[in-house]
Image (cartoon, rainbow, N blue to C red):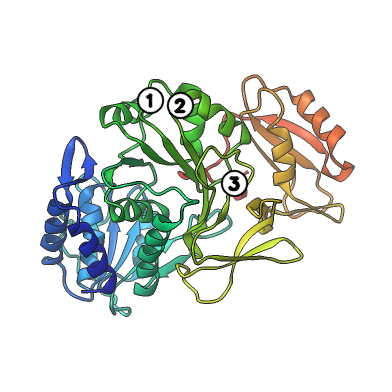
Amino acid sequence: MSRFAQQFLAKCQEFGETPALIHNDAVITYKQFVEHVYEIAGALKPGSRICTFCANSPKFVALVVASQIRSCVLIPLNPSYKPFEIKKYVNDCKPDLVIHSAGVELELEIEMRELEAMTSTASCDDTGPGALVFFSSGTTGPPKAYKYTQRVLCRQLEQFAAVQQDTRLYSPKRGTVCYGVLPLFHAGGLVTVFSALFCGCTMVINGRWDGERFQETIRKYNVEVLFTVTPVIQYLCHVAKDLDTLTTVFVGSSFTPLRCFQELPRRLRNLKNLIQIYGSTECGVLLCSTGKGICDGTSVGIPYPGVEIRINEQRQIYVKSPTATEFDFMATGDLGRFDEKLELVIEGRSKDMLKVRGWQVNPKEIEDLIRTVPGVDDCAVCKETKDDDESPLIAKIVGDGADRNEVMRVVSVNLASYKHLNRVDIVEELPRNSSGKLQRGAL
């Protein structure tokens, strides 16, 4: 058994008959969860290399832990992938076992039953003490694979324990009902579930997004803590109703408009903590967090225990974390600074910088300004023609009440001429992934 599985299951066993997971009205206690983990582990071949195409479920969480008991390398993949994507990832990952959820149609030219092995012609070349491999979101290029070794996974558990002891940071108590919205093939989604279970919480597992059902679930199970992303925060700011049990909301994964941090507390009258978090797949899912209380959204807070952050003269952010996939400082690809409270402020992505007439332009600076214009719900700034220094800037905005001329005026009055817009397009939506991250390459 791997060190991670041993330590994680020992913690789960402390909570016995406390409800651990809720999914589709079924409640699973910690005792039942541990039993289910061992049951699945008995069906796995030690050292297997496993690809999964699984929907969110308690069974999938148990499978992940079970794979570590058997020292497997498990690679969670998006169950909504189409044939071309499936074949690409299966070829790249070289599994000797593929597992998919009931109801997930892989559209491969083979038949597979749930938890049934598929023999691969490729050899399993990465056996060992067990690991998880996650793919990045691919917002700036093709998704990259990052391996969470036993060192990384065990450091995650140590980080959970350290956060519990840090009085500046919020950590839910045993029995607290939590609800997360990220997919579990995403590192952030799975680590969030692990953190809740480590604390003895009851975690509601989300299914396919449905706004009304989402709110009904919060009311039905008296959810107190919500782990969410920007699109859900924006949804709640518009339509949240009678969600009086919610006391704490975490938001991360992508930029959240500042007005959401003002509007959400008005919608959720019993909200005590509105917390912004920051992390990345390769550097550690949990790197920074604002403290207890209602944050204003201007910063992502202070480093988590054990995390070091450096910012160079170009404002590029480097992180050294025990939960990172490398030992030394790693480039995050983000730009930022420390404010007067020594909290980290994210100012954009280094790869997003646009060159205009010889000047380096940060599109996020212009976007932040445009979002202050009444009627603008979302926006993105890009060049009219990619890879052309002389090409002017344009803005694509979402919002029924947005006024193109007002957007142009506000930008021209407040920013230098090389940051001015040549055109403003009103669009129905911007290309964002499931976590709310803007896909700038698709603009």
Of the numbered discs 2 and 3, the one sitting upstream in the chain is 2
Observer-nearest of 285 and 141: 285
Check the image and report above or below for 406 versus 430: above
Q: Residues within 10 Å of mark 2 (few under 14, many from 20)?
A: many
Circle nearer the viewer, 3 or 1? 1
What amino acid is at disc 1? Asp
Under circle 2, the secondary element is loop
Which is more N-terminal, label 1 or label 3? 1
Q: For the residues marked 2 and 3, what is the alpha-carbon distance in whole angstroms?
A: 35 Å
The reply to whether callout 1 and callout 2 are in contact (CB within 8 Å) is yes
Q: Which residue is mark 1?
A: 244
**Image side of residue 330 versus residue 174, left or right:** right
Q: Secondary structure at mark 1?
A: loop
Whether residue 104 is visible here, answered yes or no, is: yes
Q: Secondary structure at mark 3?
A: helix
Residue picked out by circle 2: 268
Report, in whole angstroms, how far the alpha carbon at label 3 lies from the one at label 1: 39 Å
Disc 1 from disc 2: Cα separation: 6 Å
Residue type, numbered disc 3? Ala
Name the spot of residue 434 as percent of width and height, x first: 45, 43
In the rendering, at what x and y percent does residue 389 appear? 82, 54
Question: Quadrant location of the N terminus?
Answer: bottom left
Question: Residue at coordinates 32% horizontally, 31% vertically from top-left?
Answer: 218
Residue closer to the observer: 354 or 411: 411
The answer to which of marks 1 and 2 sits earlier in the sequence is 1
Which residue lies under the disc numbered 3?
A: 442
Question: Residue placed at 38% from the left, 74% from the top?
Answer: 151
Q: Nearer the viewer, mark 2 or mark 3?
A: 2
